[in-house]
Image (cartoon, rainbow, N blue to C red):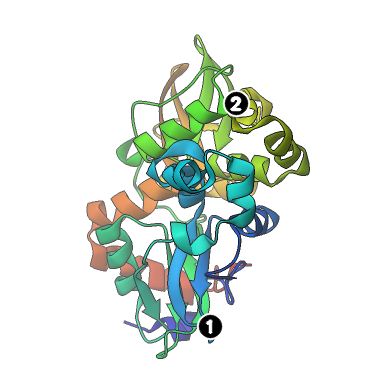
Amino acid sequence: MKALKEFKIGRYPPAVIVEKSTPIIKVIKGLTEKWVRHAPIVDESNRLIGMVSARDIIDFLGGGPKSRIVEEKYDGNLYEAIMKEPVNSIKYMPPYVTLDDDIQAVVSIMLERNIGALAITDEERRVLGIISERHIMALFSEAKTMVRVCELMSRPLITLPPQATLIEGQKLMHEKHIRRIPLKTGPNLRGIVSIKDIVKLYSLEETLERLRLLGKESVYSIPLSYLASTKVITVEPHVDLGEAIRIMRENNIGSLVVVDKGEHVGIITERDFIIKLPKMWGVELFVDEVEELIVAGRIVVLR
């Protein structure tokens, strides 16, 4: 198998790189500006010392146990916490790969650790790039996989009503370990909220001013419909996975709601692809297909 340095699939350098002392607000704005979910954390020599994801941000902002920092250190003042708390306090210690590793190492680590992105470093652990489930998935956008959407989709579809609040959405994402919540009234989809949408909301000056003047509850109570995308792209369960990936790439999204005879039966996501397809095919066969698609020149480096 060929090493990553022969392909350089991924993004070089990562869209966002931060230092351990970077305030969380700068991370939020960086992730929003570049519209990405992960940022490597480096020391003064650009060596990897951690990673922060949109999931960690949502956890800190009230979705999970990292919000204890806000309560215990800032007496519940979320505005002050966002402005002052260094990202180092909410990081996770990530596995990583080097340019001498191969695609099988990437896929195996993602499977074992259930993570969607890995930093790529040199031998001294200096950050060179990042590779994500989306980079790998995109290779299959013109491939015929002979795998139907219904074989990989997650079910049942986890939803909330449009009037559900921001904090309800944050907590549900943390509890269910999901990144997207369709909004539903009766049988009708009214929109979909992604973890990136929530991070973006907290990056807005309007939101920050509301936090400063009125406190976190005034933001937590915002209805999810306020920040949802009203355009929900769907797919039928019998569609080939390659076609579903093509639809995702065309719309620059990471999921499709699966509709069967008018019923919303599940969702197919980037995570379903990278976690479930290698298990179905076997990691070696999956990796062989990835390498063939790279060699065919469909994608080398994503920007």
Q: Quadrant of the N terminus?
A: bottom left
Q: Tell me the amino acid under the disc marked 1.
A: Asn
Q: Quadrant of residue 153?
A: top left
Q: Quadrant of the C terminus?
A: bottom right
Q: Is residue 290 above or below residue 48?
A: above
Nearest to the observer: residue 86 or residue 298: 86
Q: Is residue 130 left or right of residue 230?
A: left
In the structure shown, which secondary structural element does the residue marked by tag 2 occupy? helix
Residue tagged 1? 46
Nearest to the observer: residue 14 or residue 49: 49
Residue tagged 2? 224
State whether residue 296 appears in this view.
Answer: no
Q: Is residue 164 above or below residue 142?
A: above
Q: Is residue 262 above or below residue 240?
A: above
Residue that appears at 36% across and 66% down? 93
Q: Tell me the amino acid under the disc marked 2.
A: Leu
